[in-house]
Amino acid sequence: MESEELFSKLRSGNPEIVVQSIEEIKEKGTTSHFSILLALLHETEDREVKKKILSLFAELKSNETVPLLMDAIQNAKYKDELKELVSCCWQNGLNYSAYLPVFVDLVIDQNFPIGFEALTVIETMYGKIDQKIIDQELKKVKEIPVTEDEQQKFLLNSLPLAISSIPETNKDFS
């Protein structure tokens, strides 16, 4: 199917056609479909459409999509989808090591559900990360004032080990 026709079907407003089109993208899609799916995720109220898009994002296999997903995560426009987008990062298993500081900041600055998802991304992260960046992130965590919030305390206490334990290669596929 031509991309133009697929884009048209995604914008049809008919949930059945949209879900069918997402399935087609899952089979034969390219990174060019990512932006429209992201916009649709943000705009639609249909739970099934949202679920299908997030399922597709959780199964991404191309590292070319990493910067696109990270742009969305860092864009305030997608704050309502933030938890789910962060969750997709650890689910799809792609290499997010270049974005370690972003995930550390999410653990520190966001509510527990988002922070927990971001910690999970760090715990499943792999890739060569410059030691200066690791040291900088460890220092950032160490300088955070002590909190009384037990959930936040759990996340912050878990961060140093997670940051220090990032392997250079994906242990699932090495």
Image (spheres, rainbow, N blue to C red):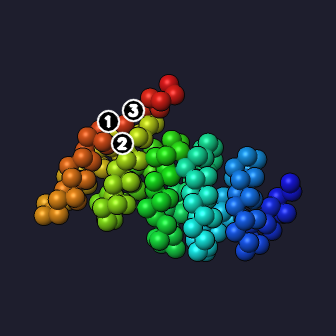
* Image location of residue 106, percent across then percent down: 36, 60
Q: Determine the image quadrant of residue 22.
A: bottom right
Q: Residues within 10 Å of mark 3 (few under 14, many from 20)?
A: some
Mark 2 secondary-structure assignment: helix
* Image location of residue 109, percent across then percent down: 31, 65
Q: Amino acid at mark 3?
A: Pro
Q: Amino acid at mark 2?
A: Glu
Q: Amino acid at mark 1?
A: Ser
In the rendered image, is residue 68 in sight?
no
Residue depicted at x 13% and y 64%? 148
Residue depicted at x 31% and y 43%? 163
Identify which residue, 16 or 9, lies in the foreground: 16
Q: Residues within 10 Å of mark 1 (few under 14, many from 20)?
A: some
Identify which residue, 95 or 93, lies in the foreground: 93
- Are the residues flagged by discs 1 and 2 in contact, CB closer than 8 Å? yes
Between the residue at mark 2 and the residue at mark 3, the CA separation in whole angstroms equals: 10 Å
In the picture, the quarter occupied by the N terminus is bottom right
**Residue placed under numbered mark 1 in the picture:** 165
- Are the residues flagged by discs 3 and 1 in contact, CB closer than 8 Å? yes
Residue depicted at x 57% and y 67%? 47
Between the residue at mark 1 and the residue at mark 2, the CA separation in whole angstroms equals: 8 Å
Mark 1 secondary-structure assignment: loop
**Residue placed under numbered mark 3 in the picture:** 167
**Residue placed under numbered mark 2 in the picture:** 123
Of mark 2 and mark 3, the one earlier in the sequence is 2
